[in-house]
Image (spheres, rainbow, N blue to C red):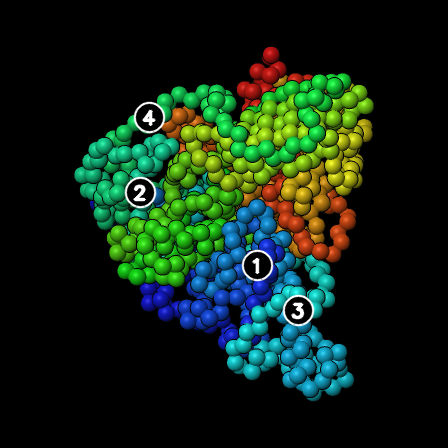
Amino acid sequence: MKISRRQLLVGAGALGGAGLIYGLRFSGDAPVSAAGVTAPAAPPVDLARDYTDWLIVGRDGTVTACTGRVEMGQGLETVLYNLVSQAFDLPNERVRIVLGDTDTCPDDGTTIGSCATSEVGWGYWLTCGRARAELARLAALALECGEEELIYSGGLYRVANDESRAIGIGALGDGVPREAVIDPAAMPAAELEYVDRGTLRIGGEEIVTGRRIYAGDLEVEGCVYGGMLLPPYHDHSTKILDADLAAASEIPGVVSIEKHRGEVRAYAESYPALDKALAAVEVSWRKPARPEQLDLVNEIRDGRKLKEVIEERGDLERELGRCDRVFTETYQTQFASTTPMETETAVADVTSDRATVWVSTQSPFLDREKIARRLKLEESAVRVISTKVGGAFGAKAGHRVADEAAALSKRIGRPVKLVYSRRDQFQRFSRYKEAVIIDLRSGVDRDGRLRALGIDVMQDHGDGLVEVYAVPHVRTNLYETDLPAWHATMRGTSFSPDCFALESHIDSVARQMDFDPVEFRKQNVTLASFRPLLDACAEMAGYANYQRSDDRGLGFAICNHGGRQLGVVCAEVSVDRTTGEVKVEHLWAAYDIGTIINRNTALANIRGAMIWGIGYALFEEVAIDGHRAHASGFEHYRLPRFSDVPPIEVAFLDNQAPGSPRGCGEMPLVPTTGAICNAVCNAIGVRIHQLPFTPERVKSALEA
Amino acid sequence: MAKRDFRLLVNGKTRNVTAEPDEPLLWVLRDRLGLKGTKFGCGAGMCGTCKVLVDGEAWPSCRLTVSAAARGQKILTIEGLGTPERLSAIQKAFVQHGAFGCGYCTAGMIVAATALLMRKRNPTRSEIIAAMDGNLCRCAAYPDILAAIEEVAASTEEIEPTA
Ligand code: FES
Ligand code: FES
């Protein structure tokens, strides 16, 4: 895909001659819309300014949907094709989905938290229903008949019993762009019923032949590679004391290299030349004030500050004093990294008064804000276009790559391509899913009823602290911590550490009291719908007749993800007692995630998330000290591979009342980790309190 | 090092390029020959996203210099394995199984699978896993990728690229 600078400014092609425009405005905090990006040849600027809306019925009978959400592998684009083509009874060729372009799409927020399908996708479905109602009204006027006489199919309204009277949806706008802002309260409810036809992913042919365009694949005339030297410390404001650029500037292919605003910046004709130049810079940095050695546990405990009492009910301390049994445990988790296969990448073209940036991003509108601030431009002078994203998982929501590329381009006066190295990907701005310590105290009566539960969570974010068990006396404290590295959003967010701790604790309590861990959970859960999920999962796993052995065990964990998604996972693991190595042998899962729009994409997301759960449980960890992280490549950070993946069986709770889907891209990760950890402890008969369950940790637990 | 001229055999055509001798083939393919299907993932031979076929074997192109790749070997990239209109058997199976999330690792996966099936037409599941274990997929589309490769492994379809 070649873009000339002229084209960028003027734009090419058209959205299909816009006819009718539908915008849906939800009032209050009701869901907004979503979407993906086709190739970055974005719709023309002149049209774009006028038509920042969700649904456009073109004069050519096409329907175009625009949303600020992005396609990053989760299948949002496919889901939107499914919804729009079904709502309008059109083939995919007559549907267009435009995603993540700040000039043509509404700001639908960041694509994160597995809510794109539930919010945007479902928002679209409702919009389509209302648009259909509006089109029927217009068609009845045009055909001079009653709406009840109309038959609709394939983009065409016909009058029943009169074949000669028909009109296509494209003609209903009379060729004049018109806008109908649809107020959901004023419109008849959609009478469409969505049916999942299990279609394949959109764009498969393009992906498997290497033709899909990602940010790094764009070619903009006159573009050079640009990059910044990575500071060796967590704190990127660390001062450069001395920089010798002579050797670096001699490297063939280097366009320029300079020290600018506390950064060393290089520009080169090729990526390898840039890489070499940055490696050849001789530089000394001021040492950080913080000591290099990091005693993580003390750092967290001593530095914690109470941030919020998340939940308080009854009298925890008094009840603990009265309970038959009281259990006190502490759990700890690790620093972890998102590591999408595509590193952060952006192409920026900045002129004196305009900036256009193509970027692999989850948050085009936030990027636009940052670029405008950094370049001192109005937001309206900045256009951010999200290209197809080569994986993100949180990394590409809080990133800086878009404004960095823009700053580089402005400085050199040419378009710049910025591609993070893998080392940059791991270390730039030192952002990780943070290590967490969680203290738990619980009181249980002799019948196995949880009476008291005190949880002290030492972590930056508390969104994962959702009630799972019905306990009359509760106190959940969230403490913020002060760690040398910064918090990054990562798939699973704080649900993963919180669930690991709670579900390990529950399992531990049940076993210490000789209760069956599944029955113990069934007895104590808040939401009744966990019970059929637990039963279904236990049955799939053959739990009733399961025989553990010294090197094989089974474990369960459950997760309530914001009250919207419920999941139960059962894992079987084998443990090599000599090496401490754990292998996940089988995973079974039962979920309640609402309506499924596309079974294929849903299952792909679910299995992918469960495999993430394996990595988080068993090996993903970034070693960190007070100065730096010690992971700069895959040689230091083990991701799940083919050989780690067990058979995965998934069932859905069959209660799908018509209604919105609730998303599934993250939640399945969370109980998978817990189930694996409980299975390991079931096999070895010892409780391990710290993630990940590496061979060394398992071995030392066995030796203790 | 000064730039030099190299003659590469890529996707059945002779291509002349001028590059630094130690420039990784990956960047020569992407930026000098316009073959963007081969992806950068780590630059260190650790992820497999950049794999290409070199005389029928899957190689990380980030670890092969242009001078080492210009010794008459036949190089095949993802673009040379099939086109959207004429997919190879493996590509077709990937589409049918939806064997990708973001698609960024897919070219490397297909190259590795093609090399395996060219060497051994009916590998077992554990042979497939062993051959593919150096290819990482952060979307973790592994189950669908495995199913796609197994399906072709069990078939009698032509593996050799036709494009
Ligand atoms: S980019 Fe070559 S192996 Fe990762
Ligand atoms: S499909 Fe996204 S990394 Fe494999």
Using the image, determine if residue A27 lies above or below residue A567: below
- Give the labeled residue for mark 4: A289
Considering only order in the chain, which callout, 2 or 3, is on the residue closer to the N terminus? 3
Q: Foreground mark, 4 or 3?
A: 3
Q: Amino acid at mark 4?
A: Ala
Considering only order in the chain, which callout, 4 or 2, is on the residue closer to the N terminus? 2
Output the chain of dot 1: A
Instruction: Say if residue A44 shows up in the picture.
Output: no
Which numbered disc covers residue A33? 1
- Give the labeled residue for mark 3: A186
Considering only order in the chain, which callout, 1 or 4, is on the residue closer to the N terminus? 1
State the separation of the CA atoms marked 2 and 4.
23 Å
Output the chain of dot 3: A
Q: Between residue A438 and residue A538, name the one nearer to us.
A: A438
Are there few (<14), some (14-19), or many (20+) residues within 10 Å of tag 2? many
Are there few (<14), some (14-19), or many (20+) residues within 10 Å of tag 3? few
Output the chain of dot 2: A
State the separation of the CA atoms marked 4 and 3.
61 Å
x and y percent of residue B62 in the render? 39, 42
Disc 2 C-beta below 8 A from ligand 1: no
- Give the labeled residue for mark 2: A228
Q: What residue is rendered at 44% in x and 35% in y?
A: A486
State the separation of the CA atoms marked 3 and 2.
54 Å
SS of the residue at dot 3? loop
State the separation of the CA atoms marked 2 and 1.
36 Å
Q: Amino acid at mark 3?
A: Ala
Is there a contact, CB below 8 Å, between mark 2 and mark 4?
Answer: no
Q: Is residue B2 left or right of residue A302?
A: left
